[in-house]
Image: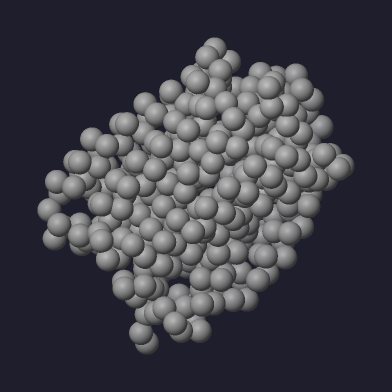
């Protein structure tokens, strides 16, 4: 049996299913982001403390993925991904009934653990089942599901919160996710190139240590930390900026600002396809420059230019993530799920640490401080990308 190739029915089914899985994961993960200003008022906490509703989830997700990927090596890819999506949908509904900030945080920690099932495995599934010539576009489509899910989660919670409450908003996200979980189960093709392995702790530790000794993978892991840390920091605090003078936008309008996520849908697919022809290193550099440009543009006062800057920043982020994540799948010759989970560990660890640290810069220096922090992070990615480009091409299996 040949691997999944672009243009075939099986390829389309796999991509539609993983698109839905990415949509569920990111809509649930980020549905709290536009609600942070509301949490600070309702529960009487600071902006940095309010950001923990996302940071604790991404941290729990990062740690859980290290173990979930190993379970998938023994139990299979599809069953764990499907169970993760279904249970996550139920938990987000329970989260809507949180009576205190402490209980909200507890549910969000549990949410992070359960959500780990899809992102820890999806990239490994694609690397195994998709023909290498079609991998760039397949990874791009999956990540576009992430971007649309993140956008929809924010827009739904922002709009429904203004009409009803944040609790009704989160319950709505849960119901939508349950329906899409069934779609995922019925449409994702079962693995054809996966061979189950027995769970052995020594083998797991050895494979992870091996990946951490690889200089190319280490650079990619560090870039993942920077990309996600920068991205989440901007989106964590843009709501505070836009709901304060001189803008004083409503919760609904702030939620709809996240429609710029649609740019990520195009960039992840377009830059994924572009990397298949021009090479990953050049396209990764392009993505970083685009992110820097967008971040700097948000410093201007006119609202329309600020939103354009957010859109440009988002375009560059999803394109860069598409390149870096697919690069990990090609670089790792064995234990691909562990390599993917390590990439995502650093990715979400960046979200947790930088996303919360950004609260310090917001409280003390305002939006200029937040953007200054982001620019410093992104500048660190350039020497890493130069180091990455020095690794022999034949070892990287790419241009």
Is residue 13 rendered to the left or right of residue 230? right
Please state the horizontal and vertical placement of residue 61, each as a whole percent of the image: 53, 44
Q: Is residue 184 above or below residue 34?
A: below
Q: Is residue 178 left or right of 204 when viewed as pictured?
A: right
Residue 235's quadrant in the figure?
Answer: top right
Residue at 79 percent across and 25 percent down: it is 42
Q: Position of residue 100 (x, y in %)?
A: 78, 28
- Considering the image in quadrants, where does the C terminus appear? bottom left
User: Between 399 and 349, which is closer to the camera in this rendering?
Assistant: 399
Q: Please determine whether, in this image, residue 242 is positioned above or below residue 167.
A: above
Which residue is drawn at the image coordinates 54% and 41% (left, top)? Answer: 308
The residue sitting at 57% across, 70% down in the picture is: 17
Residue 347 located left or right of residue 331:
right
For the residue pair 182 and 293, the one nearer the viewer reads as 293
User: Is residue 43 placed above or below 140 in the rendered structure?
Assistant: above
Name the foreground residue: 386 vs 131.
386
How far across and down, in percent of the image, does residue 393 sit?
15, 57
- The residue that appears at 68% across and 22% down in the rendered structure is 246
User: Which x, y percent locates residue 396?
Assistant: 20, 57
Residue, far right: 164
């Amino acid at each position: 049996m040949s691997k999944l190739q672009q243009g075939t029915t099986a390829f389309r089914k796999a991509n539609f299913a993983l698109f839905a899985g990415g949509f569920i994961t990111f809509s649930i993960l980020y549905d709290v982001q536009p609600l942070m200003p509301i949490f600070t008022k309702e529960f009487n906490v600071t902006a940095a403390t309010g950001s923990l509703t996302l940071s604790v989830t991404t941290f729990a997700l990062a740690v859980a993925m290290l173990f979930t990927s190993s379970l998938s090596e023994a139990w299979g890819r599809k069953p764990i991904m499907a169970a993760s999506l279904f249970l996550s949908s139920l938990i987000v509904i329970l989260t809507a009934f949180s009576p205190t900030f402490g209980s909200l945080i507890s549910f969000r920690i549990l949410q992070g653990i359960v959500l780990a099932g899809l992102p820890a495995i999806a990239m490994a599934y694609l690397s195994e089942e998709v023909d290498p010539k079609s991998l760039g576009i397949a990874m791009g489509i999956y990540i576009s599901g992430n971007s649309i899910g993140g956008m929809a989660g924010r827009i739904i919670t922002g709009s429904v919160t203004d009409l009803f409450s944040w609790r009704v908003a989160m319950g709505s996200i849960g119901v939508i996710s349950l329906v899409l979980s069934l779609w995922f189960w019925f449409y994702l093709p079962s693995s054809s190139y996966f061979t189950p392995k027995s769970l052995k702790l020594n083998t797991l530790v050895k494979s992870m240590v091996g990946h951490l000794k690889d200089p190319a993978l280490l650079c990619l892991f560090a870039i993942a930390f920077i990309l996600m840390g920068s991205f989440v920091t901007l989106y964590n605090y843009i709501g505070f900026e836009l709901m304060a003078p001189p803008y004083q936008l409503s919760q609904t309008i702030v939620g709809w600002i996240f429609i710029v996520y649609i740019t990520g849908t195009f960039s992840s697919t377009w830059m994924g396809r572009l990397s298949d022809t021009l090479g990953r290193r050049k396209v990764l550099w392009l993505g970083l420059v685009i992110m820097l440009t967008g971040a700097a543009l948000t410093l201007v006062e006119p609202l329309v230019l600020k939103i354009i800057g957010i859109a440009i920043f988002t375009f560059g982020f999803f394109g860069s993530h598409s390149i870096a994540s697919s690069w990990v799948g090609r670089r790792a010759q064995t234990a691909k799920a562990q390599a993917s989970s390590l990439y995502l560990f650093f990715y979400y660890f960046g979200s947790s640490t930088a996303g919360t640290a950004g609260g310090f810069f917001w409280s003390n220096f305002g939006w200029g401080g937040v953007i200054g922090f982001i620019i410093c992070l992104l500048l660190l990615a350039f020497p890493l990308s130069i180091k990455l480009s020095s690794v022999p091409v034949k070892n990287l299996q790419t241009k």
